């Protein structure tokens, strides 16, 4: 599988005297497989694209300012993953310590 990640700037949007440029992280991946035999020929493939917004670049005249977009859902999911791993380990450790 070939996976590639890059930061991409979108087309500028004009809002009054501001220009807003979206910035995203693009991750793409693809895979392919082919089989050639004496009586059959088959091919398969697939891919995915993931776009994660990083923020906006605000341009006003010559001034440029980056406005980040926080990934609160990702932070919450990582926190739940850590809790799902740590809490059972602590309970197992507590159970073993009480048996001694």
Image: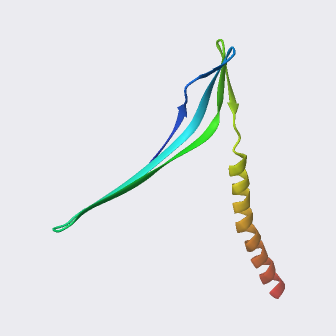
Identify the residue at image location x=19%, y=66%.
37
Question: Looking at the picture, how far across and down is residue 67, in whole percent?
Answer: 70, 30
Question: Looking at the picture, how far across and down is residue 81, in whole percent?
Answer: 69, 61
Location of residue 41 with respect to 70 vertically, above or below? below
Identify the residue at image location x=53%, y=33%.
8
Identify the residue at image location x=54%, y=36%.
7
Quadrant where the C terminus lies? bottom right
Quadrant where the N terminus lies? bottom left
Front residue of 43 and 62? 43
Location of residue 23 with respect to 64 vertically, above or below? below
Question: Looking at the picture, how far across and down is residue 21, in whole percent?
Answer: 61, 26
In the picture as drawn, the residue positioned furthest to the left comes out as 38
Question: Looking at the picture, how far across and down is residue 68, in whole percent?
Answer: 69, 34
Q: From the viewer's perspective, is 37 left or right of 57? A: left
Color theme of the render: rainbow
Q: From the viewer's perspective, is 35 left or right of 67? A: left
Location of residue 88 with respect to 71 vertically, above or below? below
Q: Specify whether residue 63 is in view.
A: yes
């Amino acid at each position: 599988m070939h996976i590639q990640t890059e930061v991409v700037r979108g087309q500028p949007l004009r809002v009054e005297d501001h220009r807003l440029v979206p910035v995203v992280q693009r991750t793409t991946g693809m895979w392919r497989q082919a089989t050639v035999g004496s009586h059959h020929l088959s091919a398969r493939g697939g891919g995915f694209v993931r776009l994660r917004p990083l923020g906006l670049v605000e341009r006003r005249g010559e001034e440029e300012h980056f406005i980040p977009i926080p990934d609160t859902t990702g932070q919450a999911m990582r926190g739940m993953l850590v809790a799902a791993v740590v809490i059972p380990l602590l309970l197992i450790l507590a159970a073993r310590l009480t048996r001694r």
